[in-house]
Amino acid sequence: MSSVEITTDVLIIGAGPSGAVAAGLLRKKGWDVLVLEKQHFPRFSIGESLLPQCMAFVAEAGMTEAVEAGGFQYKNGAAFHHAGRDTAFDFREKFSHGPGTTFQVERARFDQILAGEAEKAGADVRFGHEIVAVDFESDRPRVDVQTDEGGACQVSARFVLDASGFGRVLPRFLDLETPSSFPVRMSLFTHVEDRIDAADHDRDKILITVHPEHRDVWYWLIPFGNGRSSLGVVARPEFVERHQGNAGQRLWQIVHQDPNLARLLANAQWDTPAREIRGYSANVKQLWGRHFALLGNAAEFLDPVFSSGVTIAMKSASLAANLLDRQLRGEIVDWEKDFARPLKQGVDTFRTYVDGWYDGSFQDVIFAENPSVPVREMISSILAGYAWDTDNPYVSESRRRLRVLAELCRG
């Protein structure tokens, strides 16, 4: 069977949030964009609790109206629970400028809406298309594609953006993968009909619960707008493997080790098979190269604890699209200076607080009694996704500031 030849300005691999936002931004600037997605939408994806910073990138891509019309669960903050202690952060009470609210979304529908908006903007979005080979040796990169209907094509582009998420297409083909510095952890998760009628449960916030005995084990409960919730636990594999049964049975046992979650979910209908991910943290040797750049999880994934994945993905799409527009117009650009370093700055800020979560120092800050209001607003900004706001001292000097703050909270 002969292979069809396709030529475009920009090839985007993956139609998830980073790919859709990048496509929308590049179409607004007038470039031909082809998006190739291996799966068919709607499809299940984890990562349902967005951060307010995301809404700035959604607006930049011109997709706000469609997202707001999606009927998703409104979100204004994050609640935390540990061994009978409760605290909450309202993202509208923050240090940084920008949106203070967002949504908790079922990703199958959310991602489909964004991809649909990219199509409306003029991007050519094709589903069921898998990249099977790449060639970046010539002046125009080329990729070989197979469709799930048995067809084949070859795409030639001026530039390729890899938004393939955990598929990590270019890191695999170009040998860019490198081990993450984080310990191996795993997650068990599902969707439930939650049937929560407790008056103290705020559906406008994600609930993050620390295991009553093991501070490095934590749960998420993300309410949706239809009476359902995303429910999951993150732990070391050796902790999970102490429990018997399949993924759903293990998750049920671990969830019921926390009295508060057991109370909230006492009437829940566990009607969806649980899934498992392990060793999800990932890193790469470089974020860009000759004729390509890596977006979102295709480049690096830290940890799900602060729901930073979609925010980092959309930030990378915004940076890359604006820089690529300049390059395609003939301007000499510096991808290290204007893409990799700015992106890493925010990622490293999130990394500080992920590290602090698991060593307990950030947990001490979150559950501190009578915190300083200005400091609390600065921490709220980070939890809201504003990890690139260097006017916030807990961004610009994140490690030193967190260490000192944790010591004060403990004292």
Image (tube, grey):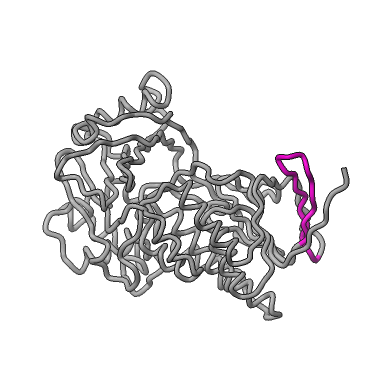
Q: Is residue 172 visible?
A: yes
Horizontal side of 94 relative to 13 (left or right) equals left
Q: Is residue 145 above or below residue 12?
A: above
Q: Position of residue 95 (x, y in %)?
A: 27, 70
The total number of labels drawn is: 0
Q: Residue at x 36, y 47 (%)?
A: 305
Residue 63 point in image, percent of width and height: 48, 65
The image quadrant of residue 395 is bottom left
Name the chief secondary structure element in magenta.
strand
Quadrant the N terminus occupies: top right
- Which is nearer the eye, 31 or 284? 31
Q: Is residue 94 above or below residue 208?
A: below
User: What segment is highlighted magenta in the picture?
Assistant: 139-156
Confirm whether residue 399 shows in the render.
no
Q: Residue at x 25, y 65 (%)?
A: 92
User: Is residue 14 in the magenta section?
Assistant: no
Q: Is residue 88 left or right of residue 338?
A: left
